[in-house]
Image: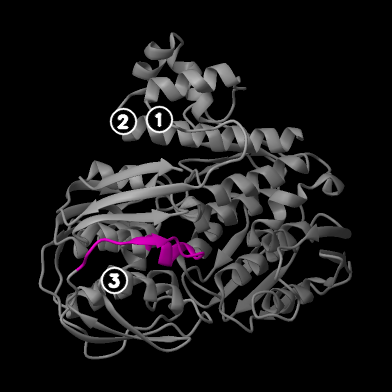
């Protein structure tokens, strides 16, 4: 095992321990007392910055009355849900996963120190951190595991890149933008199925060619070369208004010593987060929040900065859905309202009753937040179909949640997922819980409600949002349900089941 592998494993183990401790309602000090150690030692363990012996792991298992880790072959994690109960209380939205991933990649632009506050501790973030560390970046978590300090070396060691961690995250494609400003030639591994010419990759190539990037994909790697001669004034027209495509173009433009105009840019939440960070680095960005960005780049960037990623609107939608489908009154705090207005307007048309607090600023000082309280409501199907659009339309990642909401509403709802091929098929698993969901084609679902939910055992879909949708439906289903193989949920959510338990959900984690 390499040092990078070991660091990643420690972080994952620490996350498991933190989640188990929180689900038991035990503080760090109380766990420290049970283990005859210090609270600071527990903080280090949970942040992944302390080595662990088998004996200590066994003691932690006993102290938490949990089966966190087993010696030998890892066993899949499952959830047992006793549903049909109302939830109550307040739950706070965490910072954005997509924003954090973009900022981690963008930290390569800065030769100074970047400190990210309140970073989401999820698998996707840990994989990017592992890649950064493998190429020489110093990435250090704070004692409480919430903040991350990043200091790149003068010269990156790209030959030492952690191939395994890189191939397990599609976000590795976002290293192209910052690296083309530092390297004349470099190679990156790419995730399986992510071939040049597919719709997920070719738009990135179109966006980065004006900056002199030429990429050939052979042997499972991107072989990149960068031409030095390019005009001061660049114009980039994106063929796809994608979030990661826009971010790649922004990072390339930040290091281009001239003015770059990016048209058909995504103005979505993670793009705005990246723009705010670039401004702290001294890069002037005009048009934030619009589809045309003008970036005044810098040849050399070296600044010590702190930035707090904004809250995640997709997590906010997930938590609101938990309250809606269980007919509960809950408050979801710190909702980034600018990126939830279409969703809330659609829910209002379906009959949802909710109240909003006055607006207040996020920690970044720029994003507008509100607290949303949902009230038990009798929903009806919308007159028109529900479909996603680029921001400021309904977020594509929020669309799956409307499937379980539509199943709770009276009448027929047509959901049109025109972006992803066959993602809708995973939502047909709702039928196992009693929903009437008919698949019209790979992109369209016809859903009839209201559903009389009942418990069932289901294997977790291999897609993040549909997996969470099934879990939320199980909260509404009377009786006991089992969701098997839930590791994918940790890709995008930090301790989701433990946080739902705090609202009164009856969820048990087990392995077999």
Which badge, 3 or 2, is on the more N-terminal residue? 2
- Toward the front, the furthest residue is 512
Residue 67 magenta: no
Residue 35, above or below 468 = above
Rate crowding at label 3 as few (under 14), some (14 to 19) or many (20 or more) other CA atoms within 10 Å.
many
Relative image position of residue 235 (x, y in whole percent): 70, 79
Q: Are marks 1 and 2 in contact (CB under 8 Å)?
A: yes
Q: Are marks 3 and 2 in contact (CB under 8 Å)?
A: no
Residue at the image point whose x is 24% and y is 76% from the top: 407
Rate crowding at label 2 as few (under 14), some (14 to 19) or many (20 or more) other CA atoms within 10 Å.
few
Residue 457 magenta: yes
Relative image position of residue 502 (x, y in whole percent): 25, 41
Residue 177 occupies quadrant:
bottom right
Which badge, 3 or 1, is on the more N-terminal residue? 1
How much space separates mark 1 and mark 2, taking CA atoms?
Answer: 10 Å
Relative image position of residue 104 (x, y in whole percent): 61, 50
Q: In terms of depth relative to the viewer, which is nearer, 212 or 426?
A: 426
Residue 26, above or below 163 = above
Relative image position of residue 478 (x, y in whole percent): 18, 59
**Mark 2 element type:** loop
């Amino acid at each position: 095992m390499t040092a990078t592998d070991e660091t990643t494993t420690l972080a994952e183990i620490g996350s498991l321990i933190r989640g188990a401790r929180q689900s038991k309602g035990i503080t760090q000090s109380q766990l420290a007392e049970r283990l005859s150690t210090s609270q600071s030692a527990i903080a280090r363990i949970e942040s992944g910055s302390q080595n662990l012996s088998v004996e200590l792991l066994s003691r932690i298992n006993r102290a938490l009355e949990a089966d966190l880790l087993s010696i030998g072959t890892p066993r899949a994690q499952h959830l047992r849900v006793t549903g049909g109960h109302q939830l109550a209380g307040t739950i706070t939205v965490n910072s954005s996963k997509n924003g954090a991933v973009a900022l981690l990649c963008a930290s390569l632009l800065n030769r100074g120190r970047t400190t990210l506050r309140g970073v989401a501790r999820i698998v996707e973030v840990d994989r990017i951190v592992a890649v950064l560390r493998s190429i020489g970046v110093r990435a250090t978590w704070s004692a409480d595991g919430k903040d991350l300090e990043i200091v790149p070396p003068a010269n990156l060691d790209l030959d030492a890149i952690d191939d395994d961690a890189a191939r397990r995250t599609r976000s590795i494609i976002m290293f192209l933008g910052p690296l083309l400003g530092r390297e004349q030639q470099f190679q990156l591994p790419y995730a399986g199925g992510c071939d040049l010419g597919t719709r997920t990759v070719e738009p990135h190539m179109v966006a980065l060619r004006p900056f002199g990037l030429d990429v050939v994909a052979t042997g499972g790697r991107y072989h990149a070369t960068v031409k030095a001669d390019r005009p001061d004034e660049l114009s980039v027209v994106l063929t796809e208004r994608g979030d990661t495509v826009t971010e790649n173009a922004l990072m390339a433009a930040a290091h281009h010593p001239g003015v770059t105009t990016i048209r058909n840019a995504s103005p979505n939440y993670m793009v705005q987060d990246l723009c705010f960070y670039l401004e702290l680095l001294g890069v002037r960005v005009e048009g934030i929040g619009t589809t045309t960005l003008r970036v005044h780049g810098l040849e050399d960037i070296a600044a010590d900065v702190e930035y707090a990623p904004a809250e995640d609107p997709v997590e906010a939608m997930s938590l609101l859905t938990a309250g809606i489908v269980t007919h509960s009154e809950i408050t979801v705090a710190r909702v980034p309202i600018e990126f939830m207005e279409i969703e809330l307007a659609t829910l209002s048309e379906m009959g949802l009753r909710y109240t909003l607090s006055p607006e207040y600023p996020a920690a970044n000082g720029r994003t507008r937040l509100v607290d949303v309280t949902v009230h038990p409501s009798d929903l009806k199907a919308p007159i028109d179909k529900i479909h996603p659009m680029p921001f400021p339309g309904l977020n594509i990642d929020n669309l799956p949640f409307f499937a379980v909401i539509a199943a709770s509403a009276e009448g027929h709802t047509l959901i049109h997922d025109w972006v992803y091929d066959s993602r809708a098929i995973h939502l047909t698993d709702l039928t196992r819980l009693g929903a009437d969901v008919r698949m019209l084609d790979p992109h369209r679902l016809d859903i009839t409600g209201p559903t009389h939910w009942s418990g069932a055992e289901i294997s977790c879909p291999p897609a993040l949002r549909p997996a969470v949708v099934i879990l939320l439906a199980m909260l509404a289903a009377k009786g006991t349900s089992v969701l098997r193989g839930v590791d994918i949920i940790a890709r995008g959510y930090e301790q989701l089941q433990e946080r739902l338990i705090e609202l009164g959900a009856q969820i048990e984690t087990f392995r077999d």
